[in-house]
Image: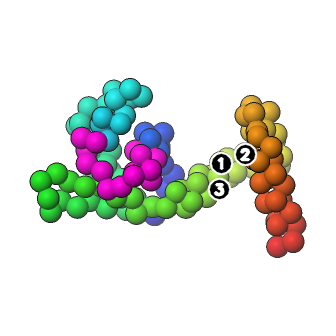
Amino acid sequence: MRYTLSEGEWKLMNLLWEAAPRTIGELVTALAGDTGWTKATVNVMLTRLAEKGAVAVDATGRSKLFTPLLAREDAVRREARSCLEKVKPGGLGLLLSAMTEDCALTEEEIAELERILKEARHA
């Protein structure tokens, strides 16, 4: 699988990563306040995700069940790689600066960033 997820696909995948398997009805209900998507819209998006290999579909029961095949960590890595390719050259510092300025980082998040950078230095 060599693609990044659209904003809508991220919404569906986040729900599936939280709890799976899920039916279309469960996903529509979970998205109702955020998107208002209909069952047909969610079905089309899930079909697209299945065709891309991001989700598995179990159609053996009364309702189709959807389970993520793409791990959240892999999706985040792909998204980060795609983002870095867009802002290169020299964009890593600017990207991190924008992220840290626009997001109120907790002390734990800052410590995690420091740990990651130390590991990168020793890798």
Q: Secondary structure at mark 1?
A: helix
Q: Which residue is mark 2?
A: 87
Mark 2–mark 1 distance (CA, rounded to whole Å):
7 Å
Disc 3 marks a residue whose amino acid type is: Arg
Q: Is residue 9 visible?
A: no
Q: Quadrant of residue 115?
A: bottom right
Q: Give the residue furthest to the bottom.
A: 123
Is residue 54 among the parts visible in the rendering?
yes
Which residue was labeled with disc 1? Answer: 83
* Residue 14, magenta (yes or no): yes
Q: What amino acid type should be assigned to the residue bearing mark 2?
A: Val
From mark 2 to mark 3, how far is it between C-alphas? Answer: 10 Å
Residues under numbered marks 2 and 1 in contact, where contact means CB atoms less than 8 Å apart: yes
Q: Residue drawn 25% across and 44% down?
A: 24
Residue 81 numbered tag: 3
* Image location (x, y in percent) of residue 85: 68, 52
66 left or right of 7 in image: left
| Outermost residue to the left | 62
Residue 118 higher or lower than 108, as above or below: below
> The magenta stretch spans which residues?
12-26
